[in-house]
Image (cartoon, coloured by chain):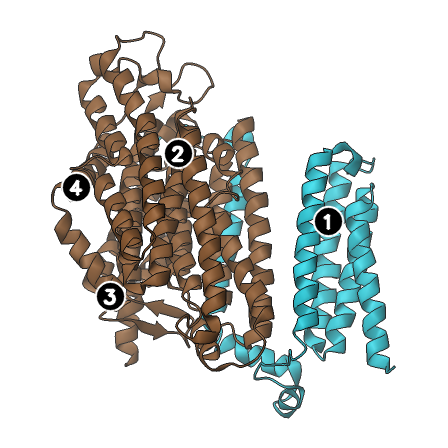
Chain colours: A brown, B cyan
Amino acid sequence: MDSFESLSLVSPWLVLAGGILATMMISVVRVSTKRPAQVFAILTLFLTLLCCLKNMPEGTQVLFNGAMEVSPLTTLALALLSVLGILFGFGSSRYLTKEKIHFSDYYHLLLILILGASILMCAKDLVVMFIALEVMSLPAYTLAGFRRNDARSNEAAIKYYITGGTLGAVFLLGASFVFGATGSTHLADIFLWSQGTTANFGLFYVGHVLLLIAFLFKVAAVPFHFWKPDVYEGAPTAVTGVMATVVTMAGFVVLARLLGMIDSARIEWVPYFESLKQLIRLVAVLSLVVGSAVVVTQKNLKRMLAYSSISHSGYLLLGLLAAMTKPELIYSVWIYLFGYSLMTCGLFLLISQSEPREDAGTELVDLTGLFKRSPFRTLLWTIFLLSMAGMPLTIGFFTKYFVFLSSLDAGEGIFAVVAAVCAVVGAYAYLRPIALMVMRDADPTAASFKTSFTGQLAVVISALGVVGWGIMPNLVIQILKGIALQH
Amino acid sequence: MNLGFFAFCVFSTIAIFGALSVVLKKNPVSSAFALVMVFFAFAGLYALIGAHLIAALQILVYTGAIMVLFVFVIMLLNQDTPVNDLKESSGLFKGVAALALAGLAMILIHTVLRAQDIVAVGQLTEEKITAQGGNLRVVSEALFSDHVFHFELTSFLLLGAIVSTVALAKRKTALGGES
């Protein structure tokens, strides 16, 4: 591979990195308004998206001495991150202005977060993985504490920072054990080691499990979930949306990579791999049960979505579990991640449109009688909530369907049943707001909903994505399946 | 008993007791100075395994720069009264933390005791480093050739940290509401 070809492979990342610098420059030139930063950030993400679509790699290419791997999956994931970034860039300016936190820094940090997440997904080296994790996490901590005058936002930032710092330390501890056992931080070298080694695996086991725990923390699977509801509630809504989509996505891609770190087909690894499966089974079932049970009891919409995302982590872990038995089943995880980010993005943008009366967050009761006040907005809410509940004709149905299908395929039928029961319980939580919106009379004390044209456009685009994909699932799913096979 | 093993025992003991007193001391300043002790002990351990550059960096960066910052922050916050009292935290949390710690320690000790055949598996042996011209040369060559991608990525980490700091430390009058 000549250098020009490899340059074109990484061009989306280069464009994004250059765009960050350009956006920062332009913010310095004019300080009186935030428009230039917003326009430049969206332009950067748009160019990155175009670059991704134009330079789709064929097969997996390893770059930078094995530090980074570019595959159709990683490029497509960056394209999706760019789309999410564009939607949040358009959708959150009114919210930020309302909260008096509309700084250019929001856009800089958003771009750096996306860069970190996209490199994290490509990382083939434990050191790169750690640095990219921090590049992604630092802006997220800051953004969570962006409402500096609000105690809950400060609490969210501190909690997120401390849990994030702890998991970073756990990751480093694990990485150093793995390095001590294998003599390399490159995942490719570690895979070779796992094929040929006859040494004692003890040190590696400890390190590998610590690495997994760090990322189970990041995706907030039960029992590592306790920080999530407070952080989701306290962080500014537009930021919570970014955290729920971008960070979750990167976290699961890395989990998949870490699980594929050793040659599980080799007979010496089978007992260890089986016990890893038990660990994932346990965490997945706990996440599903706790997430779905608690989501029903929540009154605050952001807390509700926090628990909902914990249960979604459970479904995603089931997908990973299936992929541990049959690697090609990993496509169900990609489908879930893509669909989940799109609907979560829309839902958080909708919540950020609300203007609650007091300082309290948006409560469930604020939706009472929304249909009488604003039918179109009710339609949008309904689309996203139905998708979350997993109704047919939305992506939510197909994401869950493929996880169930691959669980059955991998012989984890009992877990598919557990997941289905949890899906039914969870559906109650998502259908209740719809009933509140449509069947009740308008409540004069409920929060009003206001948005700008571009903000509503962003929501409509993600709603179209949710429904469009739900009606014609084959197109995208074939692409993702093809990628999963190549991967 | 050779000298290396003796030094290892001394440094490890200092490190473990230092780390314990970082957590257990009530006065933040004592904690900070216990941390200095831990850093020094670690520098000694690094020097023992032949990583002289890391030992020097440990003293320069951690003891020199980071600890001075720590002490400055403590001074600026004016928190020299005891606040870090473990007695105030709930017994349940202490119990869970102790259990988790004991579990982790048991797993580690078990692993280390069982893995008699843990050997140095990296490519750089001591002879090789000496042949290539010492620690500093080997590290810099690796940093700017094989690991140049890591190096460049770190610059974005620092960029993110700077923007974060500015965003959080801005004066309150700068809080802007216009679009």
Residue of label 4 = A470
- Whole-angstrom CA distance, mark 4 to mark 3, is 23 Å
Q: Which residue is situated farthest in the bottom direction here?
A: B131
Q: Earlier in the sequence, mark 3 or mark 2?
A: 2
Residue on which disc 1 sits = B70
| A189 to the left or right of B123 | left
Question: The residue tagged with tag 4: helix, strand or loop?
Answer: helix
- Nearer the viewer's eye, disc 3 or disc 1? 3
Q: Secondary structure at mark 2?
A: helix
Q: Residue at x 56, y 69 (%)?
A: A204
> Which amino acid does the dot numbered 4 rest on?
Gly
- The image position of residue A40, as x and y in percent, is 31, 47
Badge 4 and badge 2 in a common chain: yes
- Which label's residue is closer to the chain start, 4 or 2? 2
**Which dot marks residue A485?**
3
- Mark 2, residue position: A292
| Image: B139 above or below A143 | below
Q: Are marks 3 and 1 in contact (CB under 8 Å)?
A: no
Mark 2 or 1, which is nearer the eye? 2
Q: Position of residue B158 (x, y in %)?
A: 52, 56
Marker disc for residue A458: none
**Kind of residue at disc 3:** Leu
Residue in view at x 29 percent, y 71 percent: A60
- Tell me: residue A185, above or below residue B106: below
For the C terminus of chain A, give its image quadrant: bottom left
Q: Residues within 10 Å of mark 1 (few under 14, many from 20)?
A: some
Q: Are marks 4 and 3 in contact (CB under 8 Å)?
A: no
Q: Residue at x 75, y 75 (%)?
A: B47
Q: Amino acid at mark 1?
A: Phe
Residue mark closest to the camera, 4 vs 2? 2
Residue A120: x %, y % from top left: 42, 59
The quarter of the image holding the N terminus of chain A is bottom left
